Image (spheres, grey):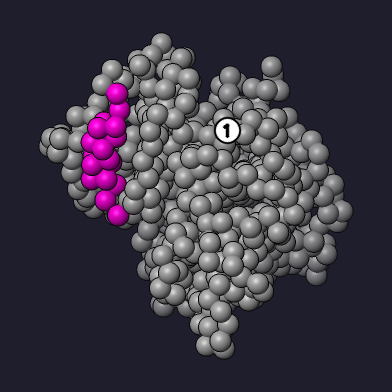
Amino acid sequence: MLRIGIPRGLLYYQYYPLWSTFFQEMGMEVVTSNPTSKAIMAAGSARMVAETCLPVKVYCGHVIELVGKCDYLFIPAIRSIQKNVYNCSKFLGLPDLIKAVVPKCPPIIDVDIDVSKGKVSLHPSSYEIGRWIKPRPKREKEAAKLAWESHLAYIKAMESEMVSPLEYLSGQKPSLASQGNEHFTVALIGHPYNIYDEFITHRIIHRLNTLGARVVLPEMAGRDLLAAGVVKVVGRPYWTYEDEIVGAGGHYLDADVDGVVAIVSFGCGPDSTMIDVVQRYARRPGARPLLTLTIDEHTGEAGMVTRLEAFLDMVARKARRRSA
Amino acid sequence: MEAYLGIDVGSVTTKFAVLDEKDELVTSLYTRTLGRPIDVIQESMQKILARLPADLVIKGVGTTGSARYLAGVVVGADVVKNEVTAHAVGASHYIPDVQTIIEIGGQDSKMIIMRDGIVTDFGMNTVCAAGTGSFLDQQASRLNIEIEDFGPLALKSKSAVRIAGRCTVFAESDMIHKQQMGYGVQDILYGLCEALTRNYLNNIGLGKEILPPVAFQGGVASNVGIVRAFEESLKTEIVVPPHHQVMGAIGVALLSHEKSMDNGGTTKFKGFGISDMEYAATSFECKACTNICEIIQIKVERKVIARWGGRCDKWDDING
């Protein structure tokens, strides 16, 4: 059976159900790397130039872990998934970047997804997978249809059943929907590859829960409200995945939560501009308090914990005052 | 007499404060951490005990600072609080209407914005130590000046030298350059004070609404040169509260008093006898997964009392 490797990094958290279902339904085995660990991060950092952001380094580590364990790697180049909205250059060049630095790299299925150019979309029926895999796999159309259904089911579970992507993908029992209401609520915003990578963000959801906060996530707001958030803050979207920071920020800073915690990557170009507009938006009177945490590979747990604790003390006191 | 003890174990210095039941300061202690927090806590507890009236009973203990968890298990703390909250509580005790708190310590600096007695915003320096006490310490010793004389000398400056304060490395080479050009030491020193405040306001103060009264605390607030530089750039009076060096310790002592009121006065305090106990910190690598976490164990009289350092809960249960 043909083995397709999908690294557990970057867009894994958005599209794993889509892509894994697609390949499995065509009769292939899907292998993925283990959750990020110190060894994975170190292996990736050692191969990448210093200027790349942490999530790309971590992704590279996941690819290295899959070397020898799969026949093909699935690393699409996602240029645009929406007309006239662009992606970070590291996503555009991801397959080439990986090919250049990973020794003994298996052949890469580098589907060029570019909705602005109008050919290939996220829907797997447009991938033309036969260009990489010969003979062309059977059941491709049907697999694409089933894959799209599982993608929609994934989005729906996050939007309406408050399942966190982490829990959905690892098959854990959803816990966020049953969080107690006696505490205050904190919205955690950022790219999924940061906030759901328990290694690089030091189990932040668990930590917020332990500190007494009920956590809501960008995906739970739903795509429409996130898109409205982007429009509210910057007018027209420019970056792909801008909704995860600008959209979620615009939505939650005005929503019924007690505070917003934003995670951004150090050295990320798009993040640095996105978080700036969110911080400006947060200065408007009446906006919810915002804490920005910038992470890189040296991010110690202690610094993060101190900031979270101080922020939650502040949020708790404000919430108490509001209800008094 | 009932009293409350606050301990602030920072990266460079360790601070102690004892408050009576009216929250008045009974005694305080400011000492270097010397990279040996446990030893320093043990030694300092002896010194504090010697200064206290015989009838004094500690009814609550709080710890703060970057070693707050460690200090907490060593002394038996009722409250373990982060530095931001501790400093905010301490400052508003002395200046009830304070709206801005500038706090500069050995290796970190922060700004706390308060409105109506609660923290509404705060900022902390990230990885860079430019604009903290350690930097001033280093430069003073390079110029062969006692850190205590730094401020008074800087105030004698007639025209400050502009020094690039964005980064300590550049600041140092800039300073050497200016010194070799023949500028007076007091002008260089005041130039450093301006560089530090500029760096602080451009980084931590960025986008913050700085309203008076402004309190300035932490070790660096002892430097009158820095106080003057802040007053000039903010164009407002800077209040250095009494006991500003131990404000974090006072804040956490106040919080332990509050806690004691809530829980009926029971304390976990292990007593001043801890000075004679044998504490040891050992570490080992956990090989259960590829993270290879370094687990630290704190032992008292050979019994493990706390463990941390893991990325998961595996070692957190000390009875396991």
Answer above or below: position of A235 versus A314.
Answer: below
Answer above or below: position of B70 versus A101.
Answer: above
> For this rendering, which residue is in front, A137 or A238?
A238
Taking the spot 27% from the left edge, 45% from the top edge, the residue there is: B40
**A78 in magenta:** no
Taking the spot 79% from the left edge, 61% from the top edge, the residue there is: A238
Mark 1 chain: B
For this view, does A142 lie left or right of residue B301? right
Magenta region: which residues?
B34-53
Tell me the residue that label 1 is attached to: B94
**B49 in magenta:** yes
Answer above or below: position of A8 versus B159.
Answer: above
Give the residue type that dot 1 points to. Tyr
Taking the spot 79% from the left edge, 35% from the top edge, the residue there is: A286
Q: Position of residue A93 (x, y in %)?
A: 62, 74
Farthest residue to the bottom: give it. Answer: B181
> For this rendering, which residue is in front, B301 or B2?
B2
Q: Main secondary structure of the magenta part?
A: helix
Q: Position of residue A203 (x, y in %)?
A: 47, 43
Q: Quadrant of residue A22?
A: bottom right
Q: Quadrant of the C terminus of chain B?
A: top left
Callout 1: SS: helix
For this view, does B317 lie left or right of residue B80? left
> For this rendering, which residue is in front, A216 or B66?
B66
Q: Position of residue B161 (x, y in %)?
A: 63, 76
Q: Quadrant of the N terminus of chain B?
A: top left
